[in-house]
Image (tube, rainbow, N blue to C red):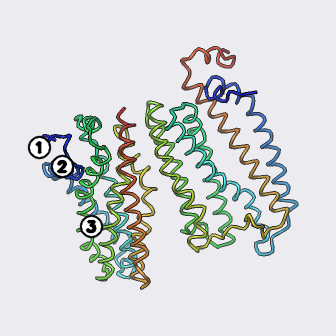
Amino acid sequence: MSSAPASPARLSLPGLLRLVVRRDLMLAMRRRADVLTTLIFFVMVVSLFPLGVGPEPEMLRKMAAGVVWVAALLASMLSLGRMFMADYVDGTLEQMLLAPQSLSVLVLGKILAHWMLSGLPLVLMAPVLGLQFDMSVQALWVLIVSLLLGTPVLSMIGAVGAALTLGLRGGGVLVSLLVLPLCIPVLIFGTGAVEAVTSSTSVAPHLLLQGALLVLAAVFTPWVTAHALRISME
Amino acid sequence: MAINWFKYSAPSTFYGLIGKLVPWFAWSSAILFTIGFYIGFFVAPTDAQQSEAYRIIFIHVPASIMSMFIYLVMAGYAALGLIFNTRLSSMMASALAPTGALFAFISLWTGALWGKPMWGTWWVWDARLTSELILLFLYLGFIALHASIDDPRRADRASALLAIIGSVNVPIIYFSVKWWNTLHQGATIKFTGTSMHAAMQQAMFIVLVACWFYAIAVALTRVRSIILERERNNQWVSELPEVRS
């Protein structure tokens, strides 16, 4: 964090947040391949389904939301290992733990950056994949909104798992084992929202519940992740 | 007379105490299982709608209750260990996890066996079944995380955090039949009276207590092994008669 504009003690919390996000984004831009791998994985998994279950449009339309959501879940698992790993290896994370600023805010910044790099590209890619599955325009919009509300939650819950498994052997598989069960509610309400469009019932409850999950996760997970990091680094 | 409860929070004294307690729990569990199953299978009347197949509830319901209850106890011990840094609480938490996972598995399995003749299917993606499955996954995640960290103290603390996060799921399972009106039936036994035959209720209650004693006996036996393993470099362990021989 050499580009700090003010002295660290006077750094405001939003300023700190911006700094962490910008740093992580810049680091990712220097190694663009990592971001693209996640996105390509997502596209590939979704494209495998029509090949696996057959190309009947009726069936594809029915399962589109579920397929996109599960693929997004798997893709976000794939990039979780990177969230703290590089900082852990080169010692930056240790400095962050020692920093006078709130570790929770630092973690929130890292989560936000992670979402911009792994969640947001999936949201932007999803409509294209939805078209492959012959989804209606209205269902596509709901899918985008539900992904916009849901993928940050995946990053947040994933951060807890990534922090707990930091530096462990076989951490990549383990983190999925820990995080996937906790992500099931996000998946259920996300696909439920799209399902509501096709069965022409109200979409709002599903999206509201997703919003509630987002708020809940935003409040608690940075704090829990900070605690988990302290356990892993002691 | 003031009893010093903290005396038994030291692994060395606790080890001796539970060595004496385990046989009592084990035997009372065995006796209660026999009585409970006898009443359940021979005394309790045949159900009007479900005929004989309903009798699986005598193991299904106690196992489901225990799977949720043990998770809460485990998370409680884990939290104690995390907050007060007591070694024994964390050991108890990791000793309870396999038993809880076993009960969750039994609950799902017996549920499937009952579901086949009653609902005509082994499995439905109903809210309660799904959340019970998540509970099993949470147990497995707890065990896997604990097993993959070499330093036992770090393993305790990391898995404690996971257990506490996961305890959000328990009220969801418990209230799932109320919140979502899906296939799994609602509660039959309520505090305000029940719609069940007395013998059925008795059998279920006795098996529940038996399961409880079984869980205590097994968890305490397991915690004894964990204590021995972790304290193997201490002198009191090497002085134990079972270790010396």
Vertical side of B210 occupied by A211: above or below: below
CA–CA distance in space, label 3 to label 2? 24 Å
Quarter of the rendering containing residue B189: bottom right
Is residue B85 visible in the rendered structure shown here?
A: yes
Q: Which disc is residue A3 wearing? A: 1
CA–CA distance in space, label 2 to label 1? 9 Å
Residue drawn where x is 36% and y is 72% of the image: A65
User: How far from the left and from the top, in percent, is residue A129?
Assistant: 27, 72
Along the horizontal axis of the image, is B44 left or right of B105?
right
> Closer to the camera: disc 3 or disc 1?
1
Residue drawn where x is 33% and y is 55% of the image: A155
User: How far from the left and from the top, in percent, is residue B42?
Assistant: 87, 59
**Which mark is first along the chain, 2 or 3?**
2
Q: Amino acid at mark 3?
A: Val
CA–CA distance in space, label 3 to label 1? 31 Å
Whether marks 3 and 2 lie on the same chain:
yes
